[in-house]
Image: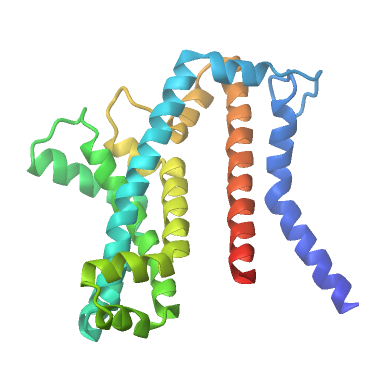
């Protein structure tokens, strides 16, 4: 009986998480103008999504920003994790503490802080992308750090020393020994950074240029507008993002299983 209860709880939790998404996916393939009113099958939402210039510009800007921020965050987070791992215990403790602050800090505080730093202190133009990139990097880099650190702890430290004994320079040992060992953590951190950038609303709202919108800010503004075709096209956009994420997760899991078998 306990086994059935446990399975029931698991399935209920999965239904709570995924049923709303599946409903959204279903409505994206209809010509309904609102959730709850089922009409005929249609691909018009996807046609609008990939033909409307405003939506295409918004998606291109969002993914360009997300990839750029993810690259910078991955570099900073990985270097920080490697440096802290090989530092003295006191230094490592301080770095780990400082890394946790942006994670638990409210996004609105981070957004305001970067705004004040870049615009008030440095007199930077609000219409530049630098405050936005800096703020999102401050959000994403700590998560990369957390993804890479466990892989460093799992790595055999003797491999690095052996590479040095065999004639490698510290830089060569870094690229030939350490980075290949922690690459799964780096990849995970990179994907997490992309997800956080795509999902962020508060930091983006306070630091973005007035004429620039990401998916999150655009969706909020669109729900307040009156263009029904744009609103329903966002259902299709949500479906596309969901399918891409599922594909990436499945691919990463299959690759991990393959590496373990080898």
**Residue at the far left in the pictured view:** 122
Which of the 4 image quadrants contains residue 174? Answer: bottom left
Residue 43 drawn above or below residue 76: above
Q: Is any part of residue 97 visible from this angle?
A: no
x and y percentages locating residue 56 in the rendered image: 47, 21
Which of the 4 image quadrants contains residue 8? Answer: bottom right
Numbered-mark total: 0
Which corner quadrant holds the N terminus?
Answer: bottom right
Which corner quadrant holds the C terminus?
Answer: bottom right
Q: Is any part of residue 13 visible from this angle?
A: yes
Q: Residue at x 25, y 73 (%)?
A: 168
Q: Residue at x 21, y 84 (%)?
A: 88
Color style of the picture = rainbow
x and y percentages locating residue 95 in the rendered image: 25, 72
Q: Residue at x 30, y 77 (%)?
A: 85
Which of the 4 image quadrants contains residue 78? Answer: bottom left
x and y percentages locating residue 159 in the rendered image: 36, 81
């Amino acid at each position: 009986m306990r086994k059935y209860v446990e399975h029931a709880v698991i399935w209920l939790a999965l239904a709570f998480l995924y049923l709303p998404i599946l409903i959204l996916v279903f409505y994206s393939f209809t010509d309904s103008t609102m959730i709850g009113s089922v009409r005929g099958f249609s691909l018009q939402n996807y046609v609008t999504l990939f033909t409307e210039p405003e939506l295409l510009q918004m998606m291109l800007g969002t993914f360009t920003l997300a990839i750029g921020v993810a690259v910078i965050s991955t570099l900073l987070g990985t270097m920080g994790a490697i440096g802290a791992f090989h530092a003295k215990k006191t230094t490592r403790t301080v770095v780990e503490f400082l890394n946790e602050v942006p994670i638990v800090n409210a996004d609105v505080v981070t957004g305001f802080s970067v705004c004040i730093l870049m615009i008030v202190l440095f007199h930077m133009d609000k219409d530049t992308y630098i405050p936005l990139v800096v703020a999102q990097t401050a959000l994403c880099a700590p998560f990369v750090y957390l993804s890479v650190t466990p892989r460093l702890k799992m790595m055999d430290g003797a491999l690095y020393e052996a590479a040095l004994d065999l004639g490698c320079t510290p830089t060569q040992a870094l690229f030939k020994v350490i980075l290949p060992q922690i690459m799964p953590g780096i990849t995970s951190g990179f994907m997490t950074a992309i997800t956080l950038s795509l999902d962020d609303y508060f930091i983006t709202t306070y630091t973005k240029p007035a004429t620039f919108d990401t998916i999150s800010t655009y969706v909020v503004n669109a729900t307040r507008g009156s263009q029904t075709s744009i609103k329903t096209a966002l259902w299709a956009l949500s479906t596309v993002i969901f399918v891409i994420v599922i594909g990436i997760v499945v691919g990463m899991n299959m690759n991990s299983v393959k590496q373990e078998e080898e």
